Amino acid sequence: KISHKDVESLRSSLIAAKLKPSTINDYRNIINAICNYAIKTDIYDGKNPSKYFEKLKVDNRREKFLTKGEIKDLLEGVKSDPTLLLFTKLSLSVGGRMGTVLNIKKRDVDLENEIITLKNVKSNKTYNGYITDSELTDLLKNRMKSIGNNDFLIGKEGVKNTERYIRKKMKVIYDELFNYDLDPNDENYHKYKVVNHTLRHTFCSTLGMKGVSPFEIQTLSNHSNLSSVMWYVKLSPQFSKDKVNGLYD
């Protein structure tokens, strides 16, 4: 009994309720999955009405990356929790997505050559990340002493869901340090809100400010294409200012 007018009406009502485009698209995906299942199992013999529910364009680009001072503040904020500290240092060092960083095992770390084998959780392919400083090396050595070769680097005794623990704890720290004066009702709120993915964004943006080529950034961050890399490579105002200082002297 569901008509194309019904799904068009639902789409319009969700837009009127000012839900995020990504959330509205999620509703569409749910309808699509239910109808496809109904067709597959002979519960329904009509056409999938979700095709009339056009997806909205979603802008997932983030503008915010951490400055050196903000990185220092963040490391100060997590230093009392070894799990959060190791997660933060690893994320900033290898630039991987959260799933990639949490999937690193002891066997993936080559301390002698300062190389970490990473797994892209989207493509299921592996690539190399690198240990960037002696503090991270010390953290890794300390952690690796107490775990087996097939154990995950990041984990906390007594915590069953490491990802949930890190998300919850890091959110509190991000909000206290960086997000306290942001307006959730601002349409650009998600672009400037600091979240775990901001660490990956910071990795790529910092490489860009150091003059690393987009192709090299793509290799180091394991992005699927160069256009995705350009979303992340943002230059700080001060970096650009330094380029034009004394331009006509």
Image (cartoon, grey):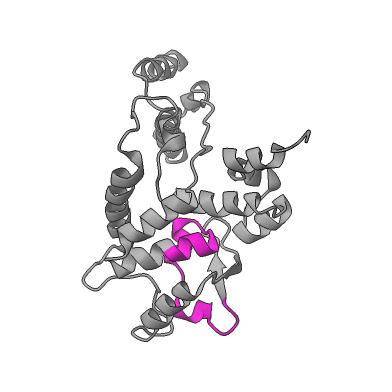
Q: Residue at x 58, y 38 (%)?
A: 237
Give the vertical position of 139 relative to 103 (above or below).
below
> In which quarter of the view is residue 178 placed?
top left
Q: Quadrant of the N terminus?
A: top left
Q: Residue at x 40, y 47 (%)?
A: 195
Give the vertical position of 162 relative to 50 (above or below).
below
> x%, y% of residue 83?
32, 67
Q: Is residue 5 left or right of residue 240?
A: left
Q: Nearer the viewer, residue 137 or 67?
A: 67
> x%, y% of residue 9?
40, 14
Q: Nearer the viewer, residue 211 or 220?
A: 211
Q: Is residue 63 magenta?
A: no
Q: Residue at x 71, y 37 (%)?
A: 244
> x%, y% of residue 78?
32, 60
**What range of the chain is rendered magenta?**
89-114
Q: Is residue 93 magenta?
A: yes
> In which quarter of the view is residue 123 placed?
bottom right
> x%, y% of residue 148?
38, 85
Counting labels gives 0
